[in-house]
Amino acid sequence: MPRKRFAVAAAAASLILGATSAASAATVSPQAEPAASAPTASAPIASAATAAACAYTAAVPADKFQGIPVFDAKKAAHPYSATLRTSQGAITFQALTDAAPCTSFSFRFLAEHQYFDRTHCHRLTTQRLWVLQCGDPTGTGSGGPGYSFPDENLTGATYPAGTVAMANAGPNTNGSQFFFVWKDTKLSPAYTPFGRVTAGLDVLQKIAAGGEDDQNAPGDGFPTLPVDINHVRISAH
């Protein structure tokens, strides 16, 4: 099957980065972002229209398959934070459950089914694009959870340091792969932002400082400091 692309445009240069979700790859192009507002305890319950839009559709590949989530608007509206316990330190982000209910619900579903446990972040970019990509249980950039779902929260999307966003293979092909932005990055608004790092940005910067092996292209490869995800803990607010 085609390898998932993390297509990146930086200035005039175009860089293709491997990624994958249930359908294919991730595509990224430049811009900059105003931080998305953090969800609050009074976040509104997702509307019926939102629920209808959150269609999780069976797709291949189905690596480490845990089933296909059924969107629950009430649960999706509950704010939560996720803490990734990695071999390089803990990284915590606040999920944007109000702005990206479908995406944050999917991430929570996978985390609660230990989907990300004992996986590793397979791609680090250190030129033009400043991201660490994770979420593929195969560690190849071509894995996915067995379903895909639509993009959301793209209007005016930007990607400053601390953004957590979905990798994809084109419009509406989200699956399990996601990336952390460790330095302000300019991308086209094509990758659903669904979280903001609240602790552990220093861990991401340490990983980035360790470099990568250029196996995909200069400034694009496997992190020199291995980033093994031991467990993802979900904490409801």
Image: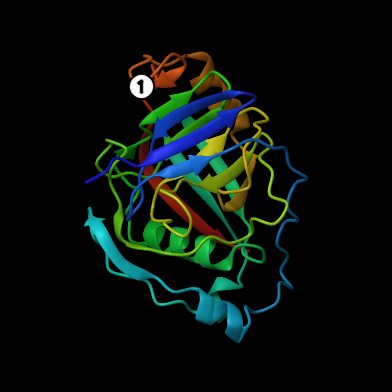
Q: From what the image shows, is residue 202 above or below residue 92?
A: above
Q: From what the image shows, is residue 6 above or below residue 55?
A: above
Q: Residue at x 30, y 57 (%)?
A: 145
Residue 214 quadrant: top left
Q: In screen coordinates, is 162 left or right of 56? A: right
Q: Residue at x 49, y 66 (%)?
A: 105
- Residue 88 seen: no
Q: From what the image shows, is residue 88 above or below residue 5?
A: above
Residue 205: x %, y % from top left: 58, 23
Mark 1 secondary-structure assignment? loop
Q: Quadrant of the C terminus?
A: bottom right
Q: Residue at label 1?
A: 216
Q: Residue furthest bottom?
A: 48
Coloration of the structure image: rainbow
Q: Residue at x 39, y 56 (%)?
A: 175
Q: In screen coordinates, is 50 left or right of 16? A: right
Q: Residue furthest front?
A: 12
Q: Amino acid at mark 1?
A: Asn
Q: How many marks?
A: 1
- Residue 187 seen: yes
Judge the density around disc 1: few (<14), some (14-19), many (≥20) Cα neighbours within 10 Å.
some
Residue 94: x %, y % from top left: 62, 52
Q: In screen coordinates, is 42 left or right of 205? A: right
Residue 1: x %, y % from top left: 21, 46
Q: Residue at x 43, y 56 (%)?
A: 174
Residue 26: x %, y % from top left: 44, 44
Decide which of 205, 149 is in the foreground and name it: 149
Residue 96 quadrant: bottom right
Q: In screen coordinates, is 52 left or right of 214? A: right
